Image: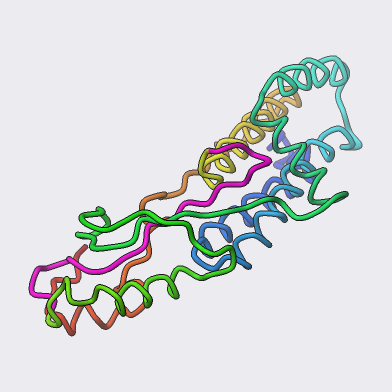
């Protein structure tokens, strides 16, 4: 905020909040493929539009053009950001992104994988469907009462988008968002304004893993477990 308590780049800040919102939705719907991919597309577009907004803020101080040109040069050197720009162009102008997912399915103790197998997952198959198929095929691995506390069936899913590389995609989104957020923090300083940190984090083990008790929380009481995970 400046001396008048106003954000000097309000449109840009709003667009960053929009990207952050869609990132949160990606995490929330990580195990529901259609929703995950819709929100991923929206995140990629909002992230790219954040820097467009910064260039077009109406009240730029003297020297902004020179400062931003140097930041653009830095961003162009980032392989991560270049991939997100390319992905945005694909989404807007060409086609859907080439997404795929794999999973480790089996027995988990809390959220730690204990026993099972890795396998590809059909593109639009929800993780809950994978979990139900797992229980139907190997349910005998665990006794019906689940006598071992916090041992249950689960699915640890990993999404990859070809245009963004072979690394898990939500983690890449977090990195890209924090990179752009850092640029905006610098922009606030250039405008002579303070801003709270924009760093975002996602609990990836919790996000990527879907357990029986995530689907039905009443199972904790049914199996007589302490609900303090």
How many discs mark residues in the rendered view?
0
Quarter containing the N terminus = top right
Q: Nearer the viewer, residue 116 or 173?
A: 116
Q: Is residue 51 left or right of residue 60?
A: left
Quarter of image, res 153: bottom left
Whole-percent x, y for residue 141 in the image:
17, 71
Q: Is residue 61 left or right of residue 229?
A: right
Q: Is residue 10 left or right of residue 143?
A: right
What residue range appears in magenta?
146-166
Please say if 62 is above or below 5: above
Quarter containing the C terminus = bottom left
Q: Residue at x 53, y 51 (%)?
A: 159
Whole-percent x, y for residue 219 in the image:
24, 81
Please say if 114 is above or below 173: below
Q: Residue at x 45, y 75 (%)?
A: 129
Q: Residue at x 80, y 46 (%)?
A: 90
Whole-percent x, y for residue 197 in the image:
55, 36
Quarter of image, res 73: top right
């Amino acid at each position: 905020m400046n001396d008048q308590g106003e954000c000097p780049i309000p449109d840009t800040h709003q667009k960053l909040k929009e990207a952050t919102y869609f990132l949160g939705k990606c995490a929330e719907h990580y195990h529901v493929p259609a929703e995950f991919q819709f929100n991923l597309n929206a995140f990629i577009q909002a992230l790219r539009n954040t820097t467009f907004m910064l260039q077009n803020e109406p009240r730029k101080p003297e020297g902004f053009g020179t400062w931003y040109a140097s930041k653009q040069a830095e961003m162009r050197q980032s392989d991560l950001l270049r991939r997100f720009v390319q992905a945005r162009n694909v989404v807007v102008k060409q086609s859907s992104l080439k997404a795929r997912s794999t999973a480790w399915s089996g027995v988990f103790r809390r959220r730690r994988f204990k026993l099972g197998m890795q396998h590809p997952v059909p593109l639009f198959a929800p993780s809950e469907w994978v979990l139900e198929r797992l229980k139907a095929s190997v349910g005998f691995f665990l006794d019906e009462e689940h006598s071992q506390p916090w041992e249950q069936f689960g699915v640890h899913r990993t999404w990859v988008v070809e245009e963004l590389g072979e690394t898990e995609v939500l983690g890449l989104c977090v990195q890209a968002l924090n990179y752009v957020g850092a640029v905006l923090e610098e922009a606030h300083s250039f405008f002579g304004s303070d801003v709270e940190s924009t760093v975002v984090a996602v609990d990836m083990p919790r996000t990527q893993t879907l357990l029986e008790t995530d689907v039905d929380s009443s199972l904790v009481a049914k199996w007589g477990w302490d609900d303090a995970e």
